[in-house]
Image: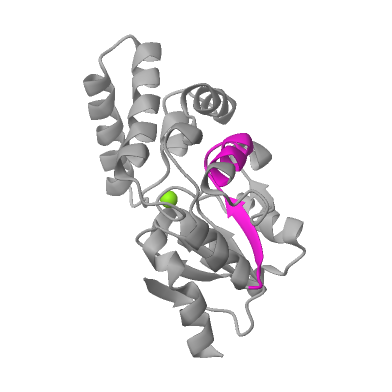
């Protein structure tokens, strides 16, 4: 876990989903692969060919001085707008097939006494299904998804909206996520705190971390 910035008195956590609230490499890889396969079908080429084209585009962005970005933003470069990404994800991804309730996580988050929002690059409905699959449906009550702002993280808009829906000033929020460039950099730019995790195991330690600072 790496703490990048913290508010003096945190009031809310803005949580990433994949790779943050669960650790399941196969599911994370599936989500990536199934969307690349769908794009390959659209382009009439093999998934391997599409993968290579996407990699080349990522390299171009790096060479131009851009940071890593989300798959959704990369797809926009290939003519797949955010609305299409939303539809593909709803059609192809079902978190209930991969995730099971995590009572330890539910207890951990409930005990923090902070406002909790999910900020995901999947559609909000998929975010809600994912939360339900983990047993967090009544604990994380605010969900901001790809279709709320039609903008994919690292766009800061979903973070600003999550803070607004929680009724908490951006400066009192902490973004918690596993990808610095996608989950944390946009939140830091809005004056939020940011904690980088390598999976749910780090999230379990948050109560002890906050208690040690009190
Ligand atoms: Mg993630």
Residue 189 in sight in this render: no
**In the image, residue 47 above or below residue 13:** above
Residue at 48 percent across and 88 percent down: it is 212
Residue appearing at x 46%, y 38% in the figure: 73
- The residue located at (44%, 74%) in the rendering is 4
Up the image or down, 172 lies above or below 185; here it is below
Q: How is the image coloured?
A: one colour
Name the outermost residue toward the top: 44
Name the spot of residue 116 as percent of width and height, x first.
64, 61
Residue 100 location in percent, x, y? 46, 44
Q: Between residues 105 and 32, which one lies in front from this camera angle?
A: 105
Q: Nearer the viewer, residue 48 or 73?
A: 48
Residue range corresponding to the magenta coloring: 113-131
Compared across the picture, whether 15 is left or right of 143 comes to left
Q: Quadrant of the C terminus?
A: bottom right
Residue 202, how many percent across, how many down?
Answer: 39, 67
């Amino acid at each position: 876990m790496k703490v990048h910035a913290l508010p003096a008195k945190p009031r809310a956590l803005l949580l990433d989903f994949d790779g943050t609230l669960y650790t399941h490499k196969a599911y994370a890889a599936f989500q990536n692969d199934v969307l690349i396969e769908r794009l390959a079908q659209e382009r009439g080429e093999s998934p391997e060919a599409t993968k290579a084209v996407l990699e080349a585009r990522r390299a171009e962005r790096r060479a131009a001085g851009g940071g890593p970005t989300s798959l959704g933003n990369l797809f926009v470069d290939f003519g797949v707008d955010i609305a299409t990404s939303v539809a593909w994800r709803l059609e192809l991804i079902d978190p209930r097939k991969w995730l099971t309730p995590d009572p330890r996580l539910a207890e951990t988050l409930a005990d923090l006494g902070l406002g909790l929002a999910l900020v995901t690059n999947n559609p909000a409905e998929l975010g809600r299904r994912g939360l339900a699959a983990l047993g967090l449906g009544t604990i994380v009550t605010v969900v901001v998804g790809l279709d709320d702002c039609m903008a994919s993280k690292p766009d800061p808009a979903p973070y600003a909206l999550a803070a607004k829906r929680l009724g908490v000033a951006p400066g009192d929020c902490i973004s918690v996520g596993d990808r610095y460039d996608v989950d944390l950099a946009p939140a830091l730019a809005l004056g939020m705190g940011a904690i980088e995790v390598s999976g749910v195991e780090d999230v379990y330690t948050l109560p002890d971390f906050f208690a040690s600072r009190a």
